[in-house]
Amino acid sequence: MPETISVGRYLFERLHQAPIGLNSIFGVPGDFNLTLLDKIDEVDGLQWRGNANELNAAYAADGYSRIKSAMGDGSGGLAALVTTFGVGELSALNGVAGAYAEHVGLVHIVGIPSIASQQKQLLLHHTLGNGNFDVFRHMSAHITQTTGILHDESQATAEIDRCIREAYVNQRPTYLAFPTNMVDVQIPIESLDKPLDLSLPKNDEGSEAEVIERVLDMISNAKDPVILVDACAARHDCTREAKQLIELTKFKFALTPMAKGSRHIHEDDDRFVGTYVGTLSYPQTKEAVESSDLVLSLGAMLSDFNTGSFSYSYQTSNVVEFHSDYTKIKKAQYPNVRMKEVLNKILKSSQLKEAIKNYKPAEIKKDPFPKEDVEPASKLTQHYLWSALSTWLRDGDTIITETGTSSFGIIQTKFPRNAVGISQVLWGSIGYSVGAACGAVMAAEEFDPKNRVILFVGDGSLQLTVQELSSMIRYKNKPYIFILNNSGYTIEKLIHGETAEYNNIQPWKHQKLLETFGGEDIENVRINTIKDLNNIFSSPEFAKNDKIRVIELMLDVMDLPENLVQQAELLAKTNSG
Amino acid sequence: MPETISVGRYLFERLHQAPIGLNSIFGVPGDFNLTLLDKIDEVDGLQWRGNANELNAAYAADGYSRIKSAMGDGSGGLAALVTTFGVGELSALNGVAGAYAEHVGLVHIVGIPSIASQQKQLLLHHTLGNGNFDVFRHMSAHITQTTGILHDESQATAEIDRCIREAYVNQRPTYLAFPTNMVDVQIPIESLDKPLDLSLPKNDEGSEAEVIERVLDMISNAKDPVILVDACAARHDCTREAKQLIELTKFKFALTPMAKGSRHIHEDDDRFVGTYVGTLSYPQTKEAVESSDLVLSLGAMLSDFNTGSFSYSYQTSNVVEFHSDYTKIKKAQYPNVRMKEVLNKILKSSQLKEAIKNYKPAEIKKDPFPKEDVEPASKLTQHYLWSALSTWLRDGDTIITETGTSSFGIIQTKFPRNAVGISQVLWGSIGYSVGAACGAVMAAEEFDPKNRVILFVGDGSLQLTVQELSSMIRYKNKPYIFILNNSGYTIEKLIHGETAEYNNIQPWKHQKLLETFGGEDIENVRINTIKDLNNIFSSPEFAKNDKIRVIELMLDVMDLPENLVQQAELLAKTNSG
């Protein structure tokens, strides 16, 4: 038994240790990170998962982290990606920024030149040629919770722990610069015995007491409260609390688009009123949410696409917003009253039962999911697709939808129990879903190879990140890749420039992609009609995720989910406003 | 004739007007730039060239700019790319940073939300969700010459002109944020009549006079001077001056790797001694450069890969470095003595003739390009490839080599007259060459459809940016795409981890790429042997760039150009140092 380990290995052991528990590390090799990558192999059970490029690696890490968060038994999710100095790290920035915007925990580890060559200000390749080695870290500082650099041997483990902790606790990316000369520095192996401190900061007691008192008071005075579960409830590990609150109070509840597929929150629940997207909601959902006289909002992320372009119109000012780092009651903000702790205290409060004793559960009009009869021979439409999908999905599926027609269409789909929804609705970077699928399928299959990961991506978005199909082939993952072939950027055509050349793309032979990327155990399907879709959705063979599949959905150029047409009109107003 | 035009159109008219003269605009549409893109069509002769993603668009703009600079009759080069706020612009950063590092002029135009929605701090999609709309511009400020934003109608044309001018004059990227509400603001059409001021700042007179006096003095005292032409000579439009200096003085001259394929500088020139890469140079070149008693360095870019890991070992301290923004004589720096103006003054100085009157042109040992007899049936090697390539290239070819074995191997190739070399040796972002080829072929074919653009890219690097093949198919370009298939990141294997899993890649079927991306008039070739290569290089049909071609070169995993083995050893020392 050696008495020391290298700092490089320490980093990866920390990421693999419970409770973080990573089994995969994403990224792209580069000459300033190669010796660091050697250390991954030294950690039992940890695998290098090389991506085709760094942006895709960041997306993959994001998808992996979301699945760890959704399926893990620990609290939050985390993932790690390794890039190289300058060229590598900058390519990843858009993906890292997306994780920042959407509260996804990840550590971006960057292999950088040795401290000695930095001090000499050498004009190394991958520099700007001006001797400034710190510029890239400064750029990343804008889109990360914190940045760290291993300058000093005596501080190395503390700095590593800090970067992991900050990413995990805040569910945001952090940046860790790892100079080549630090990789093999030896430290006592006992450093690994000290558990990572991943505890949340404690709430401010006085503020919290006031919040609890006011919330209980508002609950006891309300006739018809509604609970609105949003994305940060899942990201910050509060879906158990949300579920308890629903079960205890019997209040009706809705999900936002970004919260669809949140753990513990089931769409077949008696008290579920549907997906709330402001004016874009189905009428019964809109009515159910907006008529309430108290809104308890958990983990709100109030972006335009998540709210129907900010079109919430509650009929009450009694709104309580629980956030990961503060609480807001009507207009009053309470910093340092964090959702998780305060919700648990409310749930345990003896006064909660008292507050709801006169509450009579509101009646709920059910089935916000439309169905209709269609001619089997008729051409496939998105309207049919998203409803029919409800029948094919099963317990535990992960459904990833690209920003565009898919992320709007999926609102129409009823999710089964324990479904995990992934969609980057706030950041909205097209191409994200393909990279995210790569990371998500890696994580989901680590939990159980039978877990299905189902991607919906448009032909336009696919072009940005297509090479990540190759990584899924390389690692023998078995995702379903539904490609919506509508000959271009349909969502952009809807917003502006329906016939403009800039919204067109080069047509690809999607049926050849898997083969070209070296896929062997593959299946390609093309769906033209309603009947074609019904056939695969009723096939027991197709339901088994035993190979990687491309399902090409042939759609009219301007075929759209209904709610998207309305969103585009609202968006045009915002843009011109 | 309308009396006003929109600010959006003004921007594109300015970019299309002489002397900038752009005919293509690169980028990716996004909802904050769609109305701006409409204006491209209003400019006669200007085309939108949509890329598959933003990183590739930045690379394409970089390649386009380099060709405009190399083939245009104006002075510097320029290119423009358009991305959308947040998601789009961040994906382009690595490409923009590369243009910054390597002195390539481009304008990065970013469509951003309206000023009104910014002032309301709306949580729009593509934001970080924190109401901060300026964060992305701050990130770009680190890697651009200047950033601008069109806040104010009255300042709009001045701000546009400033961003174009700064990019052009400094040969560096600039950043221009274009809010949606500014696109259709009307301005007088006469604004276009005022010529763009693209003049260089004047040199400081006193400093310049001292520089000229000292340089002439050093020349007259030197027995055997050498002129070393580096990349910034071409980027800052000083190759005409370099050529005049060589012709006037008859001094011997060498090129650096980054300067190979610089306009007006011919490798068949009597006075050419070869490519100088420090200890990695061929012996006769090394001897010729290092034995000189005066080194006149034009546009030096002293990066590790460009210098054989900083292994220059002149036997003299008489070194004059002419740079785009300063001059250095021995240890003395002269800020604001810019290369172009001071070189012209030296060339016109009556004292120059006097200074060289006793100079006897040094004898030059010729042919630094190795040839050898090989068995036609034997397996293709890089050593053979790079020499044989010298015979196939022809006047005016553009040769693009990826960072990796290609950018080292090409040093061995003798370039014909008016060849243009493109290689991103300082920044060294793998995948660059595919995007750059897309932009370069667009520009080269605009000058003359017969211009051949020849790309050499490894199978590993190709995976990062492969979708840009699709854009070249879309726009009916006719490049030659040589793919070095050596089963992974060979250059990384050489540096560290020859058998490490992280240096492997998923094997692709390269022969299927063009077809999969919808190519119709295509040719695929696979080269296994010396004879196969000789066959295509002697074929008149193959020599005609009448279709897009993939030529897959099957190479052993560790087959390498000789100089690269040495570079790797030097690099390993720097990294561990």
Image (cartoon, coloured by chain):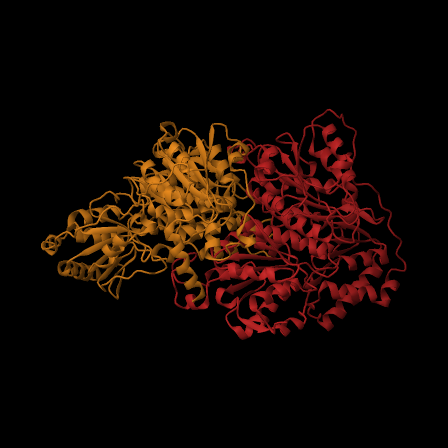
Chain colours: A orange, B red
Residue A85 against residue A521 in the figure, above or below? below
Q: Position of residue A178 (x, y in %)?
A: 48, 46
Using residue A554 as the reference point, say whether residue B368 is left or right of it.
Answer: right
Number of marks in the image? 0
Quarter in which the N terminus of chain A is drawn:
top left
Q: Which is nearer the eye, A86 or B124?
A: B124
Q: What residue is at 47 percent from the left and 51 percent from the top?
A: A94
Q: Position of residue B193 (x, y in %)?
A: 67, 72
Using residue A305 as the reference point, say whether residue B60 is left or right of it.
Answer: right
Q: Which is nearer the eye, A194 or B336?
A: B336
Q: Position of residue B149 (x, y in %)?
A: 52, 67
Q: What residue is at 38 percent from the left and 27 percent from the top?
A: A541
> Does the rendering let one see residue A162?
no
Residue B28 against residue B406 in the figure, above or below? below
Q: What residue is at 26 percent from the left and 51 percent from the top?
A: A254
> Does the rendering let one see residue B434?
yes
Q: Which is nearer the eye, B15 or A21?
A: B15
Using residue A558 as the reference point, say whether residue A211 is left or right of it.
Answer: left
Quarter-wise, where is residue B23 in the image? bottom right
Residue A278 against residue A455 in the figure, above or below? below
